[in-house]
Amino acid sequence: EAGVTQFPSHSVIEKGQTVTLRCDPISGHDNLYWYRRVMGKEIKFLLHFVKESKQDESGMPNNRFLAERTGGTYSTLKVQPAELEDSGVYFCASSQGTGGAYISYNEQFFGPGTRLTVL
Amino acid sequence: AQTVTQSQPEMSVQEAETVTLSCTYDTSESDYYLFWYKQPPSRQMILVIRQEAYKQQNATENRFSVNFQKAAKSFSLKISDSQLGDAAMYFCAYRGVLGSYQLTFGKGTKLSVIP
């Protein structure tokens, strides 16, 4: 079974340009997550989709970031316009199932990441 | 808010020896999950081991084991009989059981294995 895939693996853009990252989760996984790691810092949560709905977008840094998951399959993360501080590695993860108020163990499977460099 | 601290940016170990990676965390919740993830160079992050906070017994997965000290909020990873393939970034992560699925990560520890 294919794992989580991300495209592109690397992207180098100029400040002010637009970039769109794509994530394909494991088939059948309702939950999809975006994380980001800025150089030398922690991996930070950005947002969580359950199917096509945004369940938690508390980690999105500002309105230059737009995430979508049309049809509840793959997801895109658009950065427009890109700034220097947006450089980092963007990870996508997916997991099965949906919980109620109490969230049971639900392993998140990670993709290889997209390394974004904004010049 | 929960925080996870990994105080060792880099560690090294001789092949076949044992190494322990440290992780501390801060939370006001009584139930939660803790994880160690491994990211080999240029490859994706994989789950190494997990611990449920309500379980007193330390988790073990083959050569990987944890020392979970709930009162001290400490969650260290021990790798026994280190192998060259263990060289990677290791991330400690926390996840609560109420409300949010998000993982809270530490900064990571880069482990080198010396032949």
Image (tube, coloured by chain):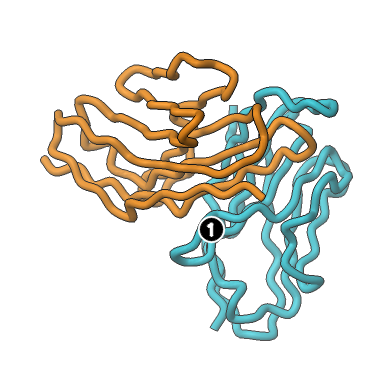
Chain colours: A cyan, B orange
Q: Which residue is mark 1?
A: A9
Which structural element holds mark 1? loop
Chain ID at mark 1: A
Q: Position of residue B20 (x, y in %)?
A: 28, 36
Residue B99 lies, with reference to residue A92, above or below; the image says above
Q: Does residue A110 appear left or right of residue B100 in this picture?
A: left
Q: Does residue A87 appear left or right of residue A62 in this picture?
A: left
Crowd rating for badge 1 (residues with CA inside 10 Å; few <14, some 14–19, many 20+): some
- Asked where in the image residue A40 lies, by quadrant, the reply is bottom left
Q: Does residue A79 appear left or right of residue B81 in this picture?
A: right
Q: Quadrant of the C terminus of chain A?
A: bottom right
Residue at 42% x, 39% y: name it: B38
Residue B103 lies, with reference to residue A78, above or below; the image says above
Q: Position of residue B93 (x, y in %)?
A: 53, 41
Q: Quadrant of the N terminus of chain A?
A: top right
Name the residue nearer the viewer: A34 or B107. Answer: B107
How many labels sit on residues?
1
Q: Position of residue A80 (x, y in %)?
A: 75, 76
- Asked where in the image residue A50 lies, by quadrant, the reply is top right
Residue B12 lies, with reference to residue B59, above or below; the image says below
Give amino acid for label 1. Answer: Ser
Q: Position of residue A108 (x, y in %)?
A: 62, 34
Name the residue nearer the viewer: A33 or A6. Answer: A33
